[in-house]
């Protein structure tokens, strides 16, 4: 999938060739070759786990810079709810101060993603009342999880919630509000920039899931913009009234926030990529029963645990918990009918599944089956230690690499020793 634009990249000058990243990557997308790591782009889901575990900061996220959008007439900021948890003195009295500081960084308007999250929550409730759904319905809000499912659990794509995630819905509502307030503008005059807590959502902007084109123009990193907000905050003499979110919207920043807001008893919420994989394994194997909804977040703690935040996720979550004590349940409500707007539905899932086809050993089905048999034969002869010294995450991955011509039997040190002993 050559057109896919990744947000996770590797700085070869910092890479020491250790095996931390290859052992932790959930899609086995990393190898160590010639003394340094390489990322197999067709496998990478931009979850950021390698950024989290690399002790040498050799992995990093690529994100947009605010200056890149200087030519737009009207700029709208979309702050993720996780942003609020980054500030140590946050409360319901000064949150507008933080948003005003963000506005003063060069934006013309702010539309909180948490506002859209409250609307998406209500639409999800309505969707869940429908008959004949594939249960459990799996949240599609985390792009890393959606791509993980497409790659490792393709049969579960039918369980994905087919409703627009808050980031996309917020961008569309923000554009609509701007055009109504400023009729002199055209859609092309407007720039919508998302402040992202993680690489996966940056990749979403470049490679949208379930829609042909995202309404988000670009993605900035929270940790890149955080200090700009702090600096502007010191200059503010009077705050504008911007904050328009309730408890439900803030809850989306942490694991379980989306699921608990639906007010269902039969739900499950898991966070951390390995925990999510274990849950998906059990769903696919049919060992999890009587669940209506599953919320999965690749980052530990949910979006507050994204690698582009500045604060410890547990501290950030505690701050948000304190903030919401004085808020109403919700401040954003759709119309009272039980209708879900047609434009809320995701209708282009081909771009989700498109990346997984490239993982096959051959485009021809019979050839792929034959090669898989060869993989298993090679795997049987390997030591099954999964030590990573060959540069692959485990022995089975090495066997696949050998069949693809990307590795040799002698890359396994145990096999090499046995050969030399003979």
Image (spheres, helix red, strand yellow):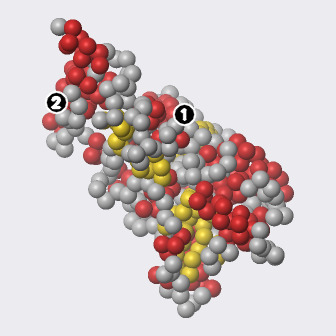
Dot 1: what SS?
helix
CA separation in Å, label 1 and label 2 = 33 Å
Is label 2 in a helix, a strand or a loop?
A: helix
At a point 48% along the width and 49% down the height, the residue shown is: 60
What's the mark number on residue 275? 1
41 lies left or right of 337: left
Q: Provide the residue designation for mark 2.
A: 370
Q: Position of residue 421 (x, y in %)?
A: 21, 8
Q: Is residue 406 above or below residue 103?
A: above
Q: Do we see residue 264 in this rendering?
A: no
Q: Residue at x 56, y 81 (%)?
A: 74
The answer to which of marks 1 and 2 sits earlier in the sequence is: 1
Q: Which mark is residue 287?
A: none
Q: How many marks?
A: 2
Do callouts 1 and 2 mark residues in contact (Cβ within 8 Å)? no
Q: Quadrant of residue 195?
A: bottom right
Above/below status of 225 relative to 69: above
Q: Is residue 180 above or below residue 382?
A: below
Q: Position of residue 226 (x, y in %)?
A: 65, 60
Q: Position of residue 30 (x, y in %)?
A: 37, 38
């Amino acid at each position: 999938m050559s057109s896919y634009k990744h947000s996770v990249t590797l700085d070869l000058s910092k890479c020491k060739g250790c095996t931390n990243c290859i052992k932790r990557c959930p899609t086995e997308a990393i190898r160590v070759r010639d003394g340094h790591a390489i990322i197999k782009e067709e496998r990478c889901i931009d979850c950021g786990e390698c950024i989290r575990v690399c002790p040498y900061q050799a992995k990093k996220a690529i994100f947009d810079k605010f200056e890149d959008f200087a030519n737009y007439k009207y700029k709208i900021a979309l702050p993720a709810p996780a942003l609020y948890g980054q500030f140590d003195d946050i409360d319901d009295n000064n949150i507008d101060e933080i948003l005003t500081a963000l506005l003063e960084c060069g934006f013309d308007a702010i539309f909180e993603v948490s506002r859209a999250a409250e609307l998406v929550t209500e639409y999800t409730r309505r969707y869940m009342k429908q008959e004949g759904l594939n249960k459990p319905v799996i949240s599609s809000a985390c792009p890393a999880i959606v791509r993980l499912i497409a790659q490792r659990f393709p049969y579960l794509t039918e369980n994905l919630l087919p409703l627009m995630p808050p980031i996309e819905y917020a961008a569309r509502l923000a554009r609509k509000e701007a055009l109504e307030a400023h009729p002199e503008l055209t859609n092309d005059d407007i720039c919508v920039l998302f402040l992202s807590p993680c690489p996966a959502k940056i990749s979403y902007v470049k490679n949208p899931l379930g829609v042909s084109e995202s309404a988000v123009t670009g993605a900035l990193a929270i940790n890149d913009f955080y200090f700009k907000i702090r600096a502007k905050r010191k200059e503010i003499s009077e705050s504008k009234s911007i904050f328009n979110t309730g408890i439900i919207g803030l809850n989306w920043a942490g694991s379980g926030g989306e699921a608990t807001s639906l007010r269902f008893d039969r739900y499950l919420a898991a966070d951390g990529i390995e925990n999510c994989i274990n849950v998906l394994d059990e769903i696919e194997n049919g060992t999890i029963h009587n669940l209506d909804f599953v919320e999965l977040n690749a980052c530990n703690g949910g979006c507050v645990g994204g690698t582009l935040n500045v604060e410890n996720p547990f501290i950030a979550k505690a701050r948000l918990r304190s903030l919401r004590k004085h808020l109403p349940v919700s401040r954003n409500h759709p119309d009272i009918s039980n209708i879900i707007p047609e434009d809320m539905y995701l209708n282009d899932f081909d771009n989700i599944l498109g990346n997984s086809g490239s993982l096959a050993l051959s485009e021809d089905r019979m050839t792929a089956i034959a090669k898989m048999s060869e993989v298993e034969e090679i795997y049987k002869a390997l030591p099954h230690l999964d030590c990573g010294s060959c540069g692959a995450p485990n022995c089975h991955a090495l066997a696949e690499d050998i069949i693809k011509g990307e590795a040799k039997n002698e890359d396994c040190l145990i096999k090499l020793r046995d050969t030399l002993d003979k």
